[in-house]
Image (tube, rainbow, N blue to C red):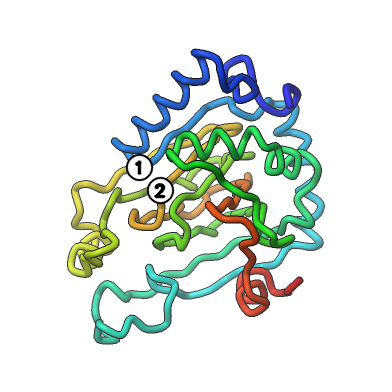
């Protein structure tokens, strides 16, 4: 994996080393403090370029064009809220998506490398993480062109693992509000306030290409702002679970990817 990951800086292949222990400890501390950690330069430039070379023609000819209006919960109804509650205001997201059977050798090699999943599990203080038993959802690549964005939402999974492959000329900013809700408190009024732009705890980061970002998104609201300029934003998303055999239903696959497997 040395040709894909900067293992000199990030020694995922040496789990018994002091450097690995330090890396895991720093990632855990960042997760506890910020709800995320980032490793700049995680993907080597040549691997990043190879991944983009695999993806670019497929984005133009094979990708699912995903454009939809949604609320922050990605649900048509929230039974405990009236339909006009400000937490249910609608937003528009749009992008092109490639699935795990379209993303190429670089991303597949990284996703299936056991040491990568083991490192992520260690940062999350979990005994193990498992790849998905889903040829479409396991790895996705998303391209956001001019004016396209991923709007406000909460993730369904506990955490999200991404690698930025290409940054736009402008826009494409990652904005988030850590722990806006909890598993026991949906905090609807604060959600509404955040959507109105009235939350001083809102934060933003700009990632550089090649950066690994691990993010607790289930209770942290987040979005990617619209891309500006001719250079699209391209990001790879890796999905792991704490149990084996996880797979989307055929209906979910069609909703996210326009097809099922």
Quadrant of the image occupied by residue 250: bottom right
User: Could you say where residue 192 lies in the image, as x and y percent from the top left?
Assistant: 23, 67
Q: Which residue is mark 2?
A: 216
Q: Is residue 121 left or right of residue 234?
A: left
* Quarter in which the C terminus is drawn: bottom right
Badge 1 crowding class, 10 Å Cα cut-off, few under 14, some 14 to 19, many 20 or more, is many
* Quarter in which the N terminus is drawn: top right
Badge 2 crowding class, 10 Å Cα cut-off, few under 14, some 14 to 19, many 20 or more, is many
User: Could you say where residue 199 lies in the image, as x and y percent from the top left?
Assistant: 20, 53
Q: Is residue 64 left or right of residue 145?
A: right
Badge number at residue 35: 1
Cβ atoms at labels 1 and 2 below 8 Å apart:
yes
State whether residue 9 is above or below residue 166: above
SS category of the residue bearing label 1: loop
**Going 52% across and 27% down the picture, which residue do you hit?**
40
User: Could you say where residue 173 lies in the image, as x and y percent from the top left?
Assistant: 44, 45
| Between 151 and 104, the one nearer to me in the picture | 104
Residue situated furthest front in the rendering = 127
| Between 220 and 58, the one nearer to me in the picture | 220
Quadrant of the image occupied by residue 194: bottom left
Tell which circle, 1 or 2, labels the residue nearer the N-terminal end.
1
**Going 49% across and 47% down the picture, which residue do you hit?**
172
Q: Between marks 1 and 2, how big is the CA–CA gap?
A: 5 Å
**Going 51% across and 14% down the picture, which residue do you hit?**
19
SS category of the residue bearing label 2: loop
**Going 25% across and 82% down the picture, which residue do you hit?**
81
Can I make out residue 140 in this image?
no
State whether residue 89 is above or below residue 237: below
Badge number at residue 201: none
């Amino acid at each position: 994996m040395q040709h894909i990951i900067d293992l000199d800086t990030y020694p995922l292949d040496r789990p018994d080393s002091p450097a690995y222990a330090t890396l895991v400890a720093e990632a855990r501390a960042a997760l506890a403090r910020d709800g995320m950690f980032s490793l700049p330069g995680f993907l080597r430039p040549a691997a990043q370029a190879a991944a983009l070379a695999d993806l670019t023609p497929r984005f133009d000819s094979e990708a699912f064009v995903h454009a939809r209006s949604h609320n922050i919960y990605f649900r048509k109804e929230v039974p405990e809220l009236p339909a006009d509650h400000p937490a249910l205001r609608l937003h528009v997201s749009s992008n092109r998506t490639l699935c795990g059977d379209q993303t190429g050798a670089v991303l597949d090699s990284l996703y299936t490398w056991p040491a990568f999943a083991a490192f992520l599990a260690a940062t999350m203080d979990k005994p193990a993480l498992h790849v998905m038993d889903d040829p479409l959802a396991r790895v996705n690549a998303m391209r956001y062109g001019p004016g396209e964005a991923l709007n406000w939402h909460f993730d369904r999974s506990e955490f999200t693992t991404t690698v930025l492959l290409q940054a736009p000329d402008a826009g494409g900013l990652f904005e988030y509000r850590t722990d806006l809700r909890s598993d026991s408190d949906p905090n609807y009024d604060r959600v509404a306030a955040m959507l109105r732009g009235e939350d001083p705890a809102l934060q933003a980061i700009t990632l550089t290409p090649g950066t690994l970002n691990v993010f607790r998104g289930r209770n942290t609201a987040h979005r990617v702002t619209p891309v500006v300029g001719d250079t699209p934003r391209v990001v790879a998303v890796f999905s792991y679970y704490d149990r084996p055999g996880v797979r989307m239903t055929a209906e979910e696959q069609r909703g996210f990817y326009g097809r099922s497997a």
